[in-house]
Amino acid sequence: MNLRRDVKSDTERNTWLLIPAYNVEAYLGRLLQEALLYLTAQTILVVNDGSTDNTAGVAESHHVNLVSHPRNSGKGAALRTGFDYLLGRGAEWVITIDGDLQHDPSRLPDFIEQAELDDHDIIIGTRQRKVGGMPWDRRFSNWATSLILSIVTGQKISDSQSGYRLIRCRMLKGMEFRCTGYDFETEMLLKLSRVGARIGSIEIPTIYDGAPSTINSVKDTLKFLKVILRFILTKK
């Protein structure tokens, strides 16, 4: 894929990169360096979620957009802050990517290309079946929640816990979310599918050599299931 062409296409489509970041000083610099091969600093936003290390300083040194929470509020809260910021600037698309290098930034052009090829509103980066170092409990949790979400939404969702996603920003306008943690990404899929969002996917590599995951498989899976049950019973 031609990088020059990709950058031009990305600029024309007004696509932003949103990075929720908590204590990822050791990883954020490399992530930004690689992301800047495909995007401009003006279309990258880091939401520093109350980090106690130099995460904010790393973002500033790369001259990207930065919003900081005064205290740690959760990944979902960081994403919600980022969405509000981007909607206020007329963004058309947003790609969300974790700040701990567990997502490969070299796949950014693939999300853009897929958006241009089809009419999906959300494209999820689905991790390959060869899961390498992914713990078995994480695999089971992801399989179970993805299956349930597929049934509830009526759309195939192969990796509901992947935070590497491209989202059409207009689908987020007027949406009200309750979750502030990892369960936010489940809530978002449910609520956007309810208003007609079309969900697709692309395959991405599974990477477990970045920061250790902070997801608690049992606790967070129960939260995911609670969100799904609440949606089924109350549609909220």
Image (tube, helix red, strand yellow):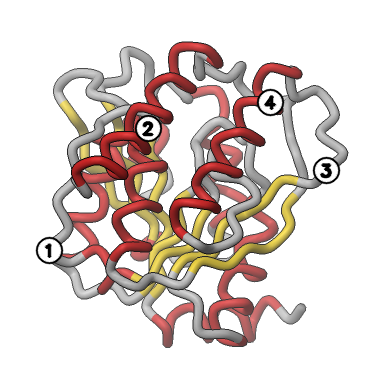
Please give left or right for residue 192 compared with residue 142 in the image. Answer: left
Q: Quadrant of the N terminus?
A: bottom right
Mark 2 to mark 1 CA distance (whole Å): 19 Å
Q: Earlier in the sequence, mark 3 or mark 2?
A: 3
Q: In this orientation, does residue 83 appear?
A: yes
User: Which disc, if any, is residue 129?
Assistant: 3
**Few, some or many residues within 10 Å of mark 3 (<14, 14–19, 20+):** few
Relative horizontal placement of residue 85, taking residue 1 as reference (left or right): left
Contact, CB < 8 Å: mark 4 with mark 2?
Answer: no
> Residue, x 73% and y 57% (percent of image)?
203
- Quadrant hosting residue 139: top right
* First along the sequence among labels 2 and 1: 1
- Real-space Cα separation, disc 4 to disc 2, in angstroms: 16 Å
Give the residue at x 42% y 30%.
Answer: 224
Which residue shows up at 43% across the image and 58% down it? 17
Q: Residue 20 sits in which quadrant? A: top left
User: In the depicted view, which residue is nearer to us: 183 or 19?
Assistant: 183
Residue, x 55% and y 23% (percent of image)?
A: 26
Residue under circle 1? 174
Foreground: disc 4 or disc 2: 4
Q: Nearer the viewer, residue 44 or 167?
A: 167
Residue 162 appears in the figure: no
Q: In the rendered view, would you say 161 is above or below 26?
A: below
Label 4 or label 1, whichever comes before in sequence order: 4
> Residue at label 2?
183
Viewer-proximal residue among 167 and 194: 194
Dot 4 falls on a residue whose secondary structure is helix
Position in image of residue 22 (x %, y %): 38, 24
Sequence order check, earlier mark of 3 and 1: 3
- Residue 140: give its label: 4
Farthest residue in the front direction? 233
Residue 62 at x, y percent in the picture: 42, 46
